[in-house]
Image: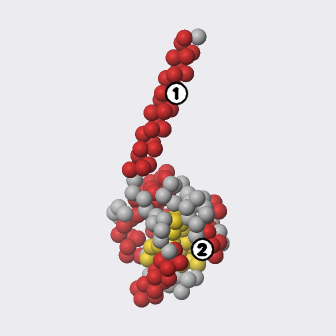
């Protein structure tokens, strides 16, 4: 019985340690979504810039609590992805909170957050949908890694 108690204790200790460090790692990442931003105003501004630069608008829906959203954002800040993104797209990040904020915008474009976040849509400077992640293509961003994210964005850049 003492052996079983020791095993249970060690398993609980290991689980607690893992949880502590995984939460700590998560809180140390930057928070990419401005929770107080006016998403509609940000989109208007992006479309104004897109019309002068002729770049498409890449809208990313996510939340600061989402590890995959944070992983995608971090990857988009590092080369070679950062160069690809800045040369190709006008980026707008929209905070959806706990699926309770800015959902009207997601719905406007076909409820693209339905299959998970981060979700993204690529729009022409005139607002035409060029691509949308309707099947949750980015919802596993942290496991895609930088090369998978780069490949995904490279394909969008060719649209």
* Residue 62 in sight: yes
In this view of the protein, which residue sits in the foreground, 84 or 116? 116
On screen, residue 111 above or below 126: above
In this view of the protein, which residue sits in the foreground, 25 or 135? 25
Crowding at mark 1 (Cα within 10 Å: few <14, some 14-19, many 20+): few
* Residue 50 in sight: no
Identify the residue shown where x is 51% and y is 22%: 9
Identify the residue shown where x is 51% and y is 74%: 39
Q: Earlier in the sequence, mark 2 or mark 1?
A: 1
Residue 156: percent from the left, percent from the top?
50, 71
Residue bearing mark 1:
12
On screen, residue 101 above or below 17: below
Judged from the image, the secondary structure of the residue bearing numbered disc 2 is helix
| Scheme of image coloration | secondary structure
Identify the residue shown where x is 37% and y is 75%: 87
Identify the residue shown where x is 46% and y is 36%: 18
Q: Which mark is residue 156?
A: none
Quarter of the image that includes the N terminus: top right
Judged from the image, the secondary structure of the residue bearing numbered disc 1 is helix
Q: What's the CA distance linking mark 2 and mark 1?
A: 43 Å
On screen, residue 88 above or below 149: below
Residue 46: percent from the left, percent from the top?
46, 80
Residue 75: percent from the left, percent from the top?
40, 59
Residue furthest top in the image:
1
Q: Which mark is residue 105?
A: 2
In this view of the protein, which residue sits in the foreground, 25 or 55? 25
Q: Quadrant of residue 50?
A: bottom left
Crowding at mark 2 (Cα within 10 Å: few <14, some 14-19, many 20+): some
Residue 155: percent from the left, percent from the top?
49, 69
Residue furthest bottom in the image:
52
């Amino acid at each position: 019985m003492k052996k079983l108690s020791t095993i249970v204790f060690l398993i609980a200790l290991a689980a607690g340690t893992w949880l502590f460090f995984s939460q700590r790692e998560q809180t140390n990442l930057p928070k990419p979504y401005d929770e107080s931003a006016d998403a509609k105003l940000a989109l208007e501004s992006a479309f104004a810039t897109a019309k002068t630069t002729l770049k498409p608008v890449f809208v990313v829906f996510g939340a600061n609590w989402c590890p995959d959203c944070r992983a995608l954002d971090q990857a988009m800040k590092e080369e070679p992805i950062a160069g690809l993104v800045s040369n190709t797209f006008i980026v707008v990040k929209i905070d959806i909170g706990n699926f309770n904020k800015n959902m009207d915008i997601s719905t406007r474009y076909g409820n693209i957050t339905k299959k998970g976040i981060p979700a993204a849509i690529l729009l022409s400077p005139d607002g035409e949908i060029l691509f949308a992640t309707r099947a949750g293509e980015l919802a596993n961003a942290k496991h895609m890694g930088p090369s998978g994210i780069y490949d995904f964005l490279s394909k969008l850049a060719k649209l």
